[in-house]
Amino acid sequence: MARPRTPIGTFGEIEFTKLPNGSVRARTRFRDHDGQLRRIEASGDTRTKAEHRLKERLAARSGYSTGFGELTPDSSFGQLVDLWLEDLDLEGKLAESTRALYERNMRQLVMPVFENLLLREISVRKVDQFIKRLASAKSYSTAKQARTVLSLALGLAVRYDALRENPVRDTARLHKPPSETMALTLEQVDAIRAAVRSWRRAPGTPGPPPDGQLEQIIEVMLGTSARIGEVLAIRKCDVDVTVSPATVRICGTIVSPAGKPTYRQSHPKTQQSTRVVSVPSFAAEVIRQRLVVVGPEAPDHLLFFTRNGTPLTTNNIRRRLRAVLSDAGIAGVTPHAFRRTVATVLDRASGPELAAELLGHTSSKITKEHYIQPDEAVDPVTAEILESLAPKRAEGQP
């Protein structure tokens, strides 16, 4: 009769061997969670100590799966990160810029704390304290980004059976501090326009004058609500000035991967953000001006580009805008401020649903929470309604 098979997670008979140095070796065969029998051994000064050490190792193996592929509970966190990054590339679902952001957040925020830990040493308590300390020392946003990449990586460890559960899932919820979305007023928009138009154009200013693209880019951002990268990715074939109002198809964005040339990505931040928008006359006029500059170039030629014909980078536009506004004494304005301003103007006129549609959001909840400045004014009709509570005057009383 065949010997019964050792059940998964258990071990067979322990053998003891006296070694030449006088110590005792305890050895047995353990059936791992992948079904394989593996020889486990430990040594000690005495038979009792050797057996005790062996059972400690067996307990560790039975408490955790041995893992498949390249990961086990005894793999280092650094090994997990390398495999996780390979897995991201294998899936190929992330935009290159998002992939680069994930790796940067992992290496700069998470790795300094977890790099020297084994996977089985990463507990809920360790992760919870890490996230809370990061939120306190840095910001809610930084802690949230770190939490995201740590959870994704440890989720891969669970899928590879190197961990039973993802310790990030049981950590305390991050509480976002209250903040107020601020849109620009019309007066502020006009001040920005004036500052950009006059920048480095005074007589006697050294160097070549600006090419005028910054002020044109601002007008298109205000006329479309598009993100800065989406505006820089607009091509000749994406616009139609033969209809009234003119239209722009938002269908790409500019990305600048680390160590690689800047290029136009064939879709916006999300696939759902692709949209055709009708633009106001001031934005249409700028688009016509850019079409004249582009001239007979191919239909896929960008409207905004460098002197060499290559794509402008979003960082370059941000730096230039920051320099212009700094010289004008205007602080706290980024390209995203124009997007929030458009959302707020549309909300006041027609409600958050139209604002969400123009911004390319799938839900107006995101638009209301992050893009529309709260309106403190209550509908004045309340004053008329409450007149019914006014005290009655006595007859003949003025």
Image (cartoon, rainbow, N blue to C red):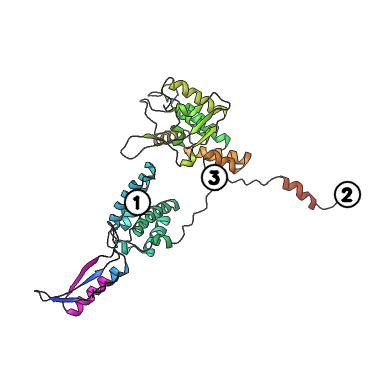
Real-space Cα separation, disc 1 to disc 3, in angstroms: 28 Å
- Residue highlighted by disc 2: 397
Q: Which class describes the residues within 10 Å of circle 2: few (<14), some (14-19), or many (20+)?
A: few
Q: Is residue 361 above or below residue 84?
A: above
Quarter residue 162 falls in: bottom left
- Residue highlighted by disc 1: 106
Q: Secondary structure at mark 1?
A: helix
Q: Name the amino acid, label 2.
A: Gln
Q: Name the amino acid, label 1.
A: Met
Q: Measured from the top left, where is residue 62 in percent x and y?
A: 30, 70
Q: Measured from the top left, where is residue 109 in percent x and y?
A: 35, 52
Looking at the image, the residue that sits furthest to the left is 20
Tell me, yes or no, whether the two marked residues, 1 and 3, touch with CB atoms within 8 Å. no
Label number found at residue 159: none
Instruction: Please tell me which residue is depicted at 17% across the width and 79% down the height of the picture.
Output: 47
Q: Name the amino acid, label 3.
A: Thr
Q: Measured from the top left, where is residue 237 in percent x and y?
A: 46, 27
For residue 333, say whether it is visible: no
Instruction: Please tell me which residue is depicted at 65% across the width and 45% down the height of the picture.
Output: 377
Q: Is residue 377 left or right of residue 343?
A: right
Q: Secondary structure at mark 3?
A: helix
Real-space Cα separation, disc 2 to disc 3, in angstroms: 53 Å
Q: Is residue 369 magenta?
A: no
- Residue highlighted by disc 3: 367
Q: Measured from the top left, where is residue 64 in percent x and y?
A: 31, 66
Instruction: Please tell me which residue is depicted at 59% across the width and 46% down the height of the picture.
Output: 374
Q: Which class describes the residues within 10 Å of circle 3: few (<14), some (14-19), or many (20+)?
A: many
Q: Secondary structure at mark 2?
A: loop
Q: Range of the magenta residues?
A: 34-58
